[in-house]
Image: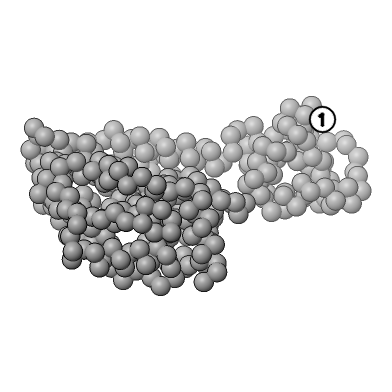
Amino acid sequence: MKSNQARQPASITLNDPRWAALLARDPAAEGQFFYAVTTTGVYCRPTCPARPPRPENVRFFPSTATAEGAGFRPCLRCQPKQPPLAERQAASIAELCRLIDDSATPPPLQQLADHAGLSTYHLHRLFKTVTGLTPKAYASARRSQRLKAELVPGKTVTEAIYSAGYITSGRFYEQSTSQLGMTPGDYRAGGNNTQIRFAIGQCTLGVILVAASAKGICAILLGDDPQALAHDLQDRFPKATLIGGDAGFEAWVAQVVGFVEAPQIGLDLPLDIRGTAFQQRVWIALRAVPAGSTVSYSELARRIGAPRAARAVAGACAANALAVAIPCHRVLRNDGALSGYRWGVARKRALLNREAES
């Protein structure tokens, strides 16, 4: 039944800032207001996919209760009394993540799609949008995390591989170095048999620690206390052989320090980048942001194909152990303000100012 409310001048709606949000279907307007259409007697959320109504037929309400109190009924398409679509989709994907986590082996895509009541195509796309990873990549990352937890003294590598959900050991050994940064046996032993060369020095940003494995630079840490930085490195590889004062390594250290002082010159050294599949995607995107430019967490999430994963992107930035080489200092809040930085907001500001002046 249509509402019997009289029309109002279109100018009232056109001059209301909520009208622009309605036309844009702005996700930020979710929960801020609802609008009703007098010619249909229906009220909607601001992101409703229905064709926009004529402005003279629109009424705005602060809540579903006030809209219903005025005689309007909820839209069957956008379901304004239910949580927003993005929240419902996120909850559905979170349930699938738990299903993957609780499975001994990764569930097939069709099984996940059936569980969610979606087609495999839609499920694959939605999963990647919400998490930043495909279901297969997510399962692989979780399996890798389980393996790290299983690689403890007293358990054989083979036992750990099968306990983590790998069906065959051969496939795992093909990927083990990129996932762990070393052989499984050495990882289980806390980095035993692994040599890490390192040096601690000074730069204009304070104390700097540079460390490298056989693969390349594995840590560039900044701080105020040399001992704290050394402990950070030791915590990463409790049983690795840490080699300091290596004369041959000094040239690498000088090159890294020069790069930190002038990031625009670039760093022509191999990097040993270790992280989850999602973290590595974020870090690859970060390295594509040129010196002198910045990007928001939301924009970075969009660049990796995961527009709803801004919070996870921030977590990946915080986990970065290669200061400046992976330029997480170039990421700002959506409003352009400086946000947290693993090595301090003052250093982040100094780096951005330095790059802007170059």
Q: Is residue 136 left or right of residue 37?
A: left
Q: Is residue 81 left or right of residue 342?
A: right
In x, y percent, where is residue 352? 52, 60
Residue nearest the viewer, comparing 120 with 253: 253
Q: Is residue 297 left or right of residue 3?
A: left
Which quadrant holds the N terminus? top right
Q: Is residue 303 visible in the rendered structure shown here?
A: yes
Residue nearest the viewer, comparing 114 with 24: 24
In x, y percent, where is residue 20? 75, 52
- Would you name the residue on which mark 1 appears? 70
State the residue at coordinates (33%, 35%). Answer: 99
In x, y percent, where is residue 50? 68, 49
In x, y percent, where is residue 6? 91, 40
Residue nearest the viewer, comparing 341 with 20: 341
Image height check: is 6 above or below 206? above
State the residue at coordinates (26%, 66%). Answer: 252
The image quarter containing residue 198 is bottom left
Q: Is residue 135 left or right of residue 173?
A: right
State the residue at coordinates (16%, 53%). Answer: 243
Amino acid marked by disc 1: Ala
Image height check: is 358 above or below 345? below
State the residue at coordinates (48%, 53%). Answer: 347
Q: Is residue 134 visible in the rendered structure shown here?
A: no
Local crowd size for mark 1, using a 10 Å CA cut-off: few (<14), some (14–19), many (≥20): some
Coloring applied to the structure:
one colour
Q: Secondary structure at mark 1?
A: loop
Q: How many marks?
A: 1
